[in-house]
Image (cartoon, rainbow, N blue to C red):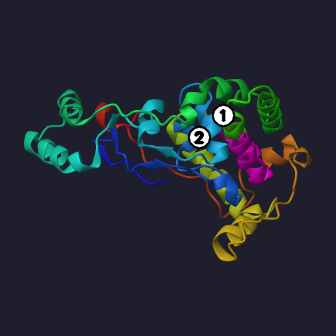
Amino acid sequence: MSGLGASVHGRFRVATEKSVCAMPETAMGLIPDVGASYFYSRLPGFFGEYAGPTGARLDGAEMLACGLATHFVPSERLPFLEQALIKVNTSDPDVISAIISRFSNIPKLKAESPYHKMKIIDHCFSRRTIEEIISSLENYEALNKKDEYWISSTIQSLKKASPTSLKIALRSLREGRLQGAGSCLIQEYRIACHVIRGEFSKDFFEGCRAILIDKDRNPKWEPSRLELITDDDVDRYFSKIDDEDWQDLKLPPRSNLPPYAIAKL
């Protein structure tokens, strides 16, 4: 993920025309992490279920539109924004928001932006399983020539990803809708530990080989097809690791933080 242009007091997330948000982990046998099951699951409709499993690249305008960013400030204005914030020397969120707004604008989404495809995304990515999502996209593609290229690209992104990672990622996002940020981070850590241990699947190592080492971009996933992965297989990644030397992620208490210091989508 290429970061936002600036992050102010945790509550405000400033994107620029140079910002990019992308989490292509499923293409490497992993899942979107660092809290993605929390913030992706809180995007409008089922946009998170689209962006996570497909690894879609979102630009600054798209980040603002979907809520990943709270403001859009052209990069040449960032130094002036910084100077303005330094001068006021306050932690009042209303004052800070007003200052950022002085330097921000509303960018226009590109014509090909996936955010224009929300009707298709909500229709297809609301399905219960990855198999049903792909089938729904294929049916939509056959009936919708206008969006045929985008739908085809989306299907290919899913079919190239690790089948195991896709199933885990979708469940992680669905469960994340009902969890707090801390619970999502703990759950993602647990999944990542299972993935790295490679007890159930070696897809992460194969993904690293294909993308980072040999760079042939032709990973051989195992299991190789979605239908070969059962619900019980997915359940394993959400269970505690059976190792006395292993512990769940321990997060520090945050009760002493003021409300404005706690980031919210």
**Residue under the point 79% across and 44% down:** 235
Question: Where's residue 5, x and y in %?
Answer: 33, 49
In the image, taking residue 233 as reference, residue 5 lies left or right, namely: left
Magenta region, residue range: 152-173
Q: Does the magenta portion include 167?
A: yes
**Residue placed most toward the observer, 8 or 154:** 154
Look at the magenta stretch and give its main secondary structure.
helix
Q: CA distance from mark 1 to mark 2?
A: 8 Å
Q: Find residue 37 and name its label.
A: 2
Image marks 1 and 2: residues in contact by CB distance under 8 Å: yes
Name the outermost residue toward the left. Answer: 87
Residue 174, picture quadrant:
top right
Question: Where's residue 229, x and y in %?
Answer: 87, 47
**Residue under the point 71% across and 65% down:** 207
- Hey, what amino acid is under mark 1? Glu
In the displayed structure, 236 sits above or below 44; it is below
Q: Find residue 175 and name its label.
A: 1
